[in-house]
Image (spheres, rainbow, N blue to C red):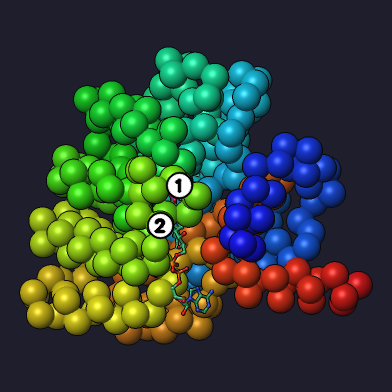
Amino acid sequence: MLKDLFIGLSKNQFLNTAAKKYGLKLGAQSVVAGTNIAEAINSIKELNAHGISCTVDNLGEFVMKKEDATAAKEQILEVVEAIHESKVDAHISLKPSQLGLDIDYSFCLDNLKEIVAKAYGYGIFINFDMEDHDRLQPSFDLLDELSKEYDNIGTVIQAYFYRAAEDIEQYKNYRLRIVKGAYKEPADVAYTSKEEIDKNYIKLIEHHLLNGKFTSIATHDHNVINHVKRFVKKHEISNDKFEFQMLYGFRKEMQLELAKEGYNFCTYIPFGDDWYGYYMRRLAERPQNLNLVAKQVFNK
Ligand code: FAD
């Protein structure tokens, strides 16, 4: 029930616009690494000092005006420049809908191409985050198109989709992030029970690890992490073939512990004033995070 409520709230345009005006509120500051690039780079430096790499998401999604998509592109280009100049250990995560996928496919492709080309010149990897089902195939199409020219790109496989097993095979030569899936999807396209999603998640992770391509296991689920640790040991898969990923502000001690144990670890760094939808989805996944909201509201 709460999940549905927060997913519904995440799509509320009025609240989204209001949130931009008022800055990080309602506990969002504990899971969003600031509203500007300088703050994000500082957070990255702190994590790098602990041997943790980062993937940076300049927050924004479901953009419906060309000027907003162009502004998002310019901001991401600035982040690419800032990563290069500050020499931090970081790459980019972006969402095609932020760059105009819902407006015009070719326009979005051109925006993405500019970012990917600049990052390619600096040796910076770009991850295409995956959104909801309507945007899934067009996002793969964008990836296919850009892969003809660039190899510094990869994407996400969401384990709740029935088609994920086919997608992971088709994209077996890519660096892939594998997740359970964050959006609310109907039963005709996706598993809806936790048991089925978790089972498929493990299956996909094992599949890509055995294929030998770099696998980012993005989860806060200690059971999955422990399973992966046992699996890589049994199959003698070396640490340079995979990494664990978690979101900024989540399970901080476990993040540091995994890095200390010698595993590659990458923290997802969301930043920017368009934090509202991202934060609502995190509340949907884990209503316990409401504690954060309560603390912020009552500690004024
Ligand atoms: P869950 O199924 O939420 O939790 C499993 C168990 O883990 C819980 O029962 C609890 O015991 C424990 N647990 C979980 N969180 C915590 C916590 N904070 N503290 C203590 N215990 C906890 N989704 C997309 O659809 N597209 C994307 O591109 C995408 N990118 C992502 C990138 C990263 C780096 C991460 C971490 C997630 C991403 N997601 C993305 C979200 C993902 O799909 C899941 O919705 C989200 O990670 C929640 O699932 P989970 O695997 O973390 O575990």
214 lies left or right of 286? left
Dots 1, 2 in contact, CB < 8 A: yes
Q: Which image quarter holds the N terminus?
A: bottom right
Q: Quadrant of residue 26?
A: bottom right
127 lies left or right of 149? right
43 lies left or right of 132? right
Numbered badge on residue 185: 1
Q: Position of residue 130 (x, y in %)?
A: 41, 43
> Which type of secondary structure does the marked residue at label 1 adopt?
loop
Numbered badge on residue 192: 2
Q: Real-space Cα distance between discs 1 and 2?
A: 8 Å
> For this rendering, which residue is in front, 49 or 291?
291
Q: Which residue lies at the image location 28% right of the left edge and 24% below the top edge?
A: 145
| Mark 2 beta carbon near ligand 1 (under 8 Å) | no
Q: Quadrant of residue 219?
A: bottom left
Q: Amino acid at mark 2?
A: Thr
42 lies left or right of 18? left
> For this rendering, which residue is in front, 275 or 186?
186
Numbered badge on residue 116: none
> Which type of secondary structure does the marked residue at label 2 adopt?
loop
Q: Is residue 12 above or below residue 111?
A: below
Q: Which residue lies at the image location 54% right of the left edge and 42% below the top edge?
A: 79
Q: Amino acid at mark 1?
A: Glu
Q: Is residue 243 above or below residue 158?
A: below
Q: Which image quarter holds the C terminus?
A: bottom right
> For this rendering, which residue is in front, 51 or 268?
268
